[in-house]
Amino acid sequence: MTIKRIAVLTSGGDAPGMNAAIRAVVRSATSNGIEVVGVRRGFQGLHEGDMSLLGPRDVANTIQRGGTILLTARSRTWRSPEGRALGAEHLRKWHVDGLVVIGGDGSFHGAHYLMEEHGIPVIGLPGTIDNDLYGTDHTIGYFTAVETALDAVDKLRDTGASHERIFVIEVMGRHAGHIALDVAIAGGAEEVFIPEDEKPVADIVHVIQESLRKGKASSIVIVAEGYPGGAMGVAKAIEDGTGLETRVSILGHIQRGGTPVSSDRILASRLGEAAVQAFMDGISGVMVGRTNGEISYTPLQDTWEKRKDVNRDLYRCAKLLSV
Amino acid sequence: MTIKRIAVLTSGGDAPGMNAAIRAVVRSATSNGIEVVGVRRGFQGLHEGDMSLLGPRDVANTIQRGGTILLTARSRTWRSPEGRALGAEHLRKWHVDGLVVIGGDGSFHGAHYLMEEHGIPVIGLPGTIDNDLYGTDHTIGYFTAVETALDAVDKLRDTGASHERIFVIEVMGRHAGHIALDVAIAGGAEEVFIPEDEKPVADIVHVIQESLRKGKASSIVIVAEGYPGGAMGVAKAIEDGTGLETRVSILGHIQRGGTPVSSDRILASRLGEAAVQAFMDGISGVMVGRTNGEISYTPLQDTWEKRKDVNRDLYRCAKLLSV
Amino acid sequence: MTIKRIAVLTSGGDAPGMNAAIRAVVRSATSNGIEVVGVRRGFQGLHEGDMSLLGPRDVANTIQRGGTILLTARSRTWRSPEGRALGAEHLRKWHVDGLVVIGGDGSFHGAHYLMEEHGIPVIGLPGTIDNDLYGTDHTIGYFTAVETALDAVDKLRDTGASHERIFVIEVMGRHAGHIALDVAIAGGAEEVFIPEDEKPVADIVHVIQESLRKGKASSIVIVAEGYPGGAMGVAKAIEDGTGLETRVSILGHIQRGGTPVSSDRILASRLGEAAVQAFMDGISGVMVGRTNGEISYTPLQDTWEKRKDVNRDLYRCAKLLSV
Amino acid sequence: MTIKRIAVLTSGGDAPGMNAAIRAVVRSATSNGIEVVGVRRGFQGLHEGDMSLLGPRDVANTIQRGGTILLTARSRTWRSPEGRALGAEHLRKWHVDGLVVIGGDGSFHGAHYLMEEHGIPVIGLPGTIDNDLYGTDHTIGYFTAVETALDAVDKLRDTGASHERIFVIEVMGRHAGHIALDVAIAGGAEEVFIPEDEKPVADIVHVIQESLRKGKASSIVIVAEGYPGGAMGVAKAIEDGTGLETRVSILGHIQRGGTPVSSDRILASRLGEAAVQAFMDGISGVMVGRTNGEISYTPLQDTWEKRKDVNRDLYRCAKLLSV
C-alpha cells in the first residue's frame, strides 16, 4: 500500500521534545509526499475528531518548545471499545493510512487496541521523561528531565556547601529509577534510592555517618518517586537514625517542562523521520526506538511487557564515586 | 580613627551573591590599604575564633559562585552575652577595627548586640533572598531567587499548556511576599497569595472558574510560604471548591542556590564597596543598602523594626494582567 | 476624549520582554474596556495596514517568549511624509484613538512625526537592549541582554582559569556603554572600554601587566561595540603591547534573543499597564518609563536629545574591584 | 604488577567534564586502595614536576565545574625527547605506576611518546569538545559544547523570527563537523556546512531562496569552523548570491566553558572509573572510551590515525527536516 496520509498525536504525560518529534513526522512526511493530520488532545481528541491538516510551516519554530502543540489529555472514553470505534471512524473519514502515537506505555496500549480492533496501522514513538520503555536506550524527554533535576541538585549543592546540611531530593520516573540514577551520578550524590534495588532505607544512616566522618560538608540523597516511602520516608529514616536535620525537595511536574536539550531534540528528530520511513516500508505495530545508536523496532506489546533494567554498571559506579 | 583592618562574615541562610559581596569588601579594602580578616561559619566561627586574613587573590573567581566561601551557620552560643564576649575578644586579638556582617535580620541582631555590648563598630549588608529588610530596595540574593522560581513556573507553563491543569507553586520569602509577587507578575500567574494581604483563600475558586470560562488552558497560582496554610492549603481550597485536580510544587532550598544573576552581583559589588567606604567615613551601626539607585544608611534596629511593604502598584498590576 | 481603542506595534531591533509589554498593553486595555489593534512589522506594517484586533487570549503564554509576536521591521517608506500619511489613514480607518510604540529612539522618531503631522496621540515604551534612552532608568530587554553576555563571560572564565589566557569580549549597546559596564562589574572583568570614556586603549597594556604580576590566572576585558576599534582594536593593542595571545569573542545578535529575565518582564508589565493608563489620563507624546521605581513621563524628543550617562559610581567601582 | 599509585593530568584545550573525570579517577582509585598524584598544567607541569597527592576531599564539589582544577597548558618542552625524559623522571621519583591523560589527540601523542620512550604505562581519556577521536562514540565535553551552541541558536531564532533575517553561526569542532551537525539538527537549521562534505558553498543560495519562497521568516545556517572559509565565507556567498543581509556570529571559546551537562558528567564518571580498572587489569597504551554504551579500549595511535566520520544518517536527516 502506498501511504498518502498519516496522523499523529501526543498522549499521556507530556515530555520535552514531543514538538521536535511532531515536527520531524510532519516534515519527513512532506518530504516524501505524504500528508499529515494532527490530532489534538491525544486519544480524547481522536475520539472527538479534533483534528486538522499540518504542514511544514505549522511546525516552524516549535523544535525548541517544551510541552506539545497538539496537547495531550488522559482519555476515559478510549478505554471502551465504543470509544475506540469512534476514533477509528474519524481516522477513516480523514483517509488516514497510519497513526503515529507519541507517548508512553499507556498510550501504546491505546494504540495497540486501535490496531487490533480496527486494523489501523500504528507506530509508537517513545515520548516520556521516565525512560521506562523496553526497546529503546532512551525516551524522548528523558535527557531534559535529568538536566532539570540536576540543575536543582547543583543549586542545593551551593547552599549545602555553605551550611553543612542533608538534602533529600525526590525525582520523577514512575516505577523506574533511570532519572534518579543519572541524577545521582551527575550530581555527585552520596546515595540514591531506586525501585530496582530493595536495599533497606536504614542503610542510609550508615552512609550519612560515614560522610560526616570523612569530613563531607553536606550530603545529597536522591530518591526515585517509585521508591517505597519516597523522599519523605528516606528523610525520616535519616532524621530518626542520625538526629540530624534534613531538607526535602520535591521537584514534581517542573521536570516535565522546559526547553528540550539537544539530545532530546536529536533523538526526536531521528525517530520522527524513522516512523514515517517505517510506514513507507510497510512496518507497523511497533515502537520505533534507538538502540546502540541505530533505529530499532519493537512490537508494541514488548515495550510494556518486557522489563528494562537500570544500567547496573552506573549503579555500581555511583556507589564507588561517593567515597 | 584610621581603619587598618576589618573583618567580614556571612550569617543566616545563604544567598546568591554573598561571595560577590565578600569579594567587594576584600578588594575595596585592599584598594584603600585596609586588611581584611575572613570569619568562617558566621557568629559561630567568630565565637570560636575560626578566622584568617583574606587577600584579593583569595576571592578570585568567586563572583559567579552560589553559596558563601566563608560558610554560614546558625549559632546558639551567640545568643548568650558570654558567647558574644568571646567573639569580641577574638576580634580585638586580631586588631579588627570594624566588622561587616552579611545576612538578614537575625544576623543584624547579632551584630547589634556586639556593638552595644562591646563597642565593636559593625556594618550590615543585606544578604537574604527574602528582600524583607527595611532600608534597601533589594537585598543581595533576591533577584536570583526570583529567577530560579520563575524558571520553574516557565517549565510548569509548558506542561500546563499541554494538559489543562492547575499548578500551585509555593515560593520562599519567610514572612514576606516579595518573591511571590515578582514571580506572579513575571510568570503571568492567575493568582498570588501573600502574607501582606488577608484575602480569603476561597476567592481563588472564583478566579479559577473565571479562568476556565475565559478559555484559559491552565492556571498558575503562586503562594508565598508565609501565607497561612501555604501551597497545600490553597490547593485544597481549589480542589474542594472546583472539584478540579491540582499539582503542588514546593521549590524549597533550591531558591537559595545557583549562580547569582547580574543584578545580585552588581548590588553586592556596590554595597561591599560602600561598606568599606562607610567605615572609612566613620559610619557604623547601620545597614548599607541601595534606595532609588543611591547608597543609603539605615540604623540596624530600623531594618527589623520598620516594615517594608510589598509594592502595591505591582500587586494591583498582577491582578489586572491576569484577565 | 474617552479612549475606546488603541493600537500597539513593536519597531526597530527586537528586545526580550517586548511580548510581555504587548501582553500588558492588551490586558490592561481589556480590563479597562478598551480594544486593542495589533500592528505587525512595525511602521512598515502600519504603512501597509497589516493589523488586526488582539484579545487577552491572543497574548496568552507569550510573557516568557523572546522576540515579538508582532514582528518588527525597518521601514523605508515611513521616512517619507506620504508613507506616514498612509499609516495615519489606516489608524483612522480602524478608529484608533492612540498608538503605543515599543522600541528605541528611531522608533520614537517615527512616532513623533506621526503625532506632529497627523495628530495621532502616541506613547512610547522603551524597548531596546541598549538602555540608551533618556527618561527611564532601564529599558525593556536590557536586563536580559546583560545576563546573556554575562553567561558568556562566566563560560570564558572557566576556560580562562584553566589556560592563563586573555579574553576580549565585545558586547552590544550601540553608542552607549551601559551593557558593557554592567557585564564588567558582574563578570569581574579586569578592564572595560566604553564610548563614554576616552581613555587611551594603550592603558590596557599596563593593566594586563599588573594583572600578571599580581598572579591573576587570566584576564577578561569587556569592550562596548561603540568603543572606537571595538574588541578587535583592543585585542590588537594588547597583543602589540604585551606580546601575549588574546581570544576575541563577538556575541552579536544572540544578545537580542532569549527568554526575558524577571526584571524585564516586570518592567514591561508595569510600563504596558502605565501606557494604557496614560492614554486614559489624556497623556500622550511621551515615553512612559520607570525612574527611581516610579512611573515617569518624558517628552519623546527628550528621549533622544538628552543624554543618559552611564552610572559613574559603577564605573569607578569596576576599577576598584579589579584589583 | 600491583598498582599502588597513579598520576592524572589534563592537557590541550579544556573541556567541560574534565573535573568530573579527574574526580572519578581519584575516587575510583581511592576506593581500590590506590593513591593518586595530580599533575598541574598538563605535560608542561609534568616536565617541571608540578604535582601533589590528590585525595577524595580535594575533588569534592568539583563535578559541576567547568574548566579543570589541574589546569592545562600547551607545552613546547614536551616536544623534545629531553623534555619528556625529565617528565618520566618526575613520575618515577613519585613512584607512579601509570598515568591517566585526559585530552585530545595532541595530548595522546604526548602520552604515546612517554610510554614508547620510557615505558610508563599510560591511559588516555577522551577530553575534548570536538568529538574527533576514533574509538569512542562521544568525548567528554562534547555534549556541553553542543548545548552551549544550541542555546545561542535558540536566541538567534527569537530575533530571527521577529526580523526576517539570515543568521550564519560558526561553531567549534576543529577539522570535524560533529558539533555543527548536532547543532544543526537540534537547532532546526536550514543548512549546515561541515568539513566532511565538499558541497559547494554556492548551493546555499538556492537553499535560502527556496526558504523565502516557502514563507520561512528567517534562515539559520550552521558552519563548522573547519569548513573552508568558515562563517564569513558562507555569509559572503549568501550576500553575493541573494543580495540579502546576513548576520554572522562566532561563538569561539565560550563553547569550551560552562557547567557540564549531565551526559558529559556521566560519561566522565564512567570513563574515569574504567581507566583505573584498566590499570588494575594490566591494560595500558589505550584510550578508554564508550562505544554502544559499553567501555571500549582503542590503541592510542588508532585514535588519531583512524578516521571517525560524522553520522551520515543524521546528516541526511538534517536536510530532510529543513523542508
Image: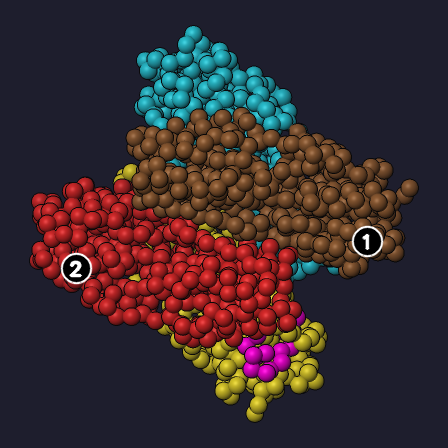
Chain colours: A yellow, B cyan, C brown, D red
- Say if B278 sits above or below B204 in the image: above
- Say if B287 sits above or below D69 in the image: above
User: How far from the left and from the top, in percent, is residue B245?
Assistant: 65, 57
- Say if A21 sits above or below B72 in the image: below
Is A194 contained in the magenta span? no
User: How far from the left and from the top, in percent, is residue A207?
Assistant: 31, 47
Is A39 contained in the magenta span? yes
Q: Nearer the viewer, residue A241 or B197?
A: B197
Q: Residue at x 71, y 46 (%)?
A: C107
Instruction: Name the quadrant of the N terminus of chain A.
Output: bottom right
Residue A310 visible, this orientation: no
Q: Does residue B269 appear to the left or right of C21 in the view shown?
A: left
Amino acid bearing label 2: His
Labels 2 and 1 touching (C-beta < 8 A): no
Q: Which mark is residue C82?
A: 1
Magenta span: A27-43
Q: Does residue B43 appear to the left or right of C302 in the view shown?
A: left
What whole-number distance in Å separates the C-alpha atoms at marks 2 and 1? Answer: 75 Å
Q: Does residue C175 appear to the left or right of A213 in the view shown?
A: right
User: How far from the left and from the top, in percent, is residue D80?
Assistant: 14, 52
Q: Residue at x 40, y 58 (%)?
A: D172
Q: Residue at x 43, y 7 (%)?
A: B1
